[in-house]
Image (tube, rainbow, N blue to C red):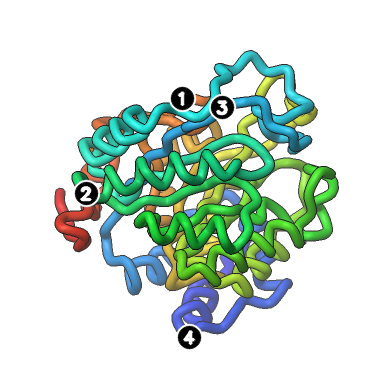
Amino acid sequence: MTDYMPFAQKALNDQPLTMDESLAVLNTPDDELLPLLQAAFLVRSKYFGRTVRIQMLQNAKSGACQEDCHYCSQSAVSTAPIERYNLMAQKQIVEGARMAAASKAHRYCIVISGRGPLDREIEEISQAVRSIKGEIPIQICCSLGLMNESQAKQLKAAGVDRVNHNLNTSEAFHSSICTTHTFQDRLATIKNARAAGLEICSGGIVGMGERDEDLIDLAMALRDVKPDSVPLNTFRPSAGTPFENIDQLTPQRCLKVLCLFRFLHPRTELRVAGGREHNLRSLQPLALYPANSLFVNGYLTTPGAPAQEVWDMIKDMGFTIEVVDDRQAVATS
């Protein structure tokens, strides 16, 4: 049996795994999964203890996207039967924040479809954020597509804490999942958000046909970005998209990838994100050993576990929920 503790020790010493070590993590035999999870938990517990951060998404504008992202049911090349609507009214966005707070969410993420936000959308979202910040002690993340620095500064001035903009996959594989924007376009948006003083949330999607080396390259590219949060989505195919027949993940594979990202991002919030319920299934609770964050109440166009179910899972695993109280994070069971 492989000894996985040296991987944990390297992470605790802020040393990246080599390509061969990273491949060894991804190719861990299924019957050695528990020792691998224990090594990842050693790193997770060092920096995050046994706390879990909950986040809730608001799909504030759905469908009608100009981009050709092959994995996405909202893209221009998708015929998926999803709900389509323009930007929600401000009162709906604010109500979503109230629901997030009631779900013990640490952070509320406002997401819109499209290549990038219109100026009027930036203004309307900014007004909604000001209302939220005046009423609800919750952090705000926005995922609005490609943005320039001026737009990012407007969000920062309104009280937005963080911008999500995923790299999604390796630079080498990016053209296989999208041709209407580049990997470098994504890096530019992250640079603009950081220049505006915003925190960065950036991660990827696992299971779109990429090689192990692509996952490792993604993890290493994110080390260069140094995001405050890494959401790791596991691909859930949608009928009507170019990737509708790609469904190759197992729960064990998902857990191995989470462990790799924990080793390579030891101090960073790691969120088991979209596709959790579909791909991890009955092994969802084990994701809390490498990851310290997750979503409640669904994703953009697919349902997810309700808050009470997630609270019970966290409690049953002996973890506690980290919530925001007067803008300070505290632990609650």
Q: Amino acid at mark 1?
A: Pro
Whether tag 3 and tag 2 are in contact, CB under 8 A, the answer is no
Name the residue carrying label 1.
303
Q: Name above or below for residue 202 compared with residue 78.
A: below
Identify the residue position indicated by label 2 in the image: 134
Distance Cα–Cα, label 1 vs label 2? 29 Å
- Circle 2 Cα neighbour tier, 10 Å, few/some/many (<14 / 14–19 / ≥20): few
Question: What label sits on residue 13 in the rendered view?
Answer: 4
Amino acid on which disc 4 is placed: Asn
**Badge 1, how many Cα within 10 Å: few under 14, some, many 20+?**
some
Q: Gap between marks 3 and 4, in whole Å? A: 43 Å
Q: Amino acid at mark 2?
A: Gly
Please give the residue where the numbered disc 3 appears in the rendered image.
62
For badge 3, the amino acid type reads Ser
Residue 284: x %, y % from top left: 42, 40
Front tag of 3 and 2: 2
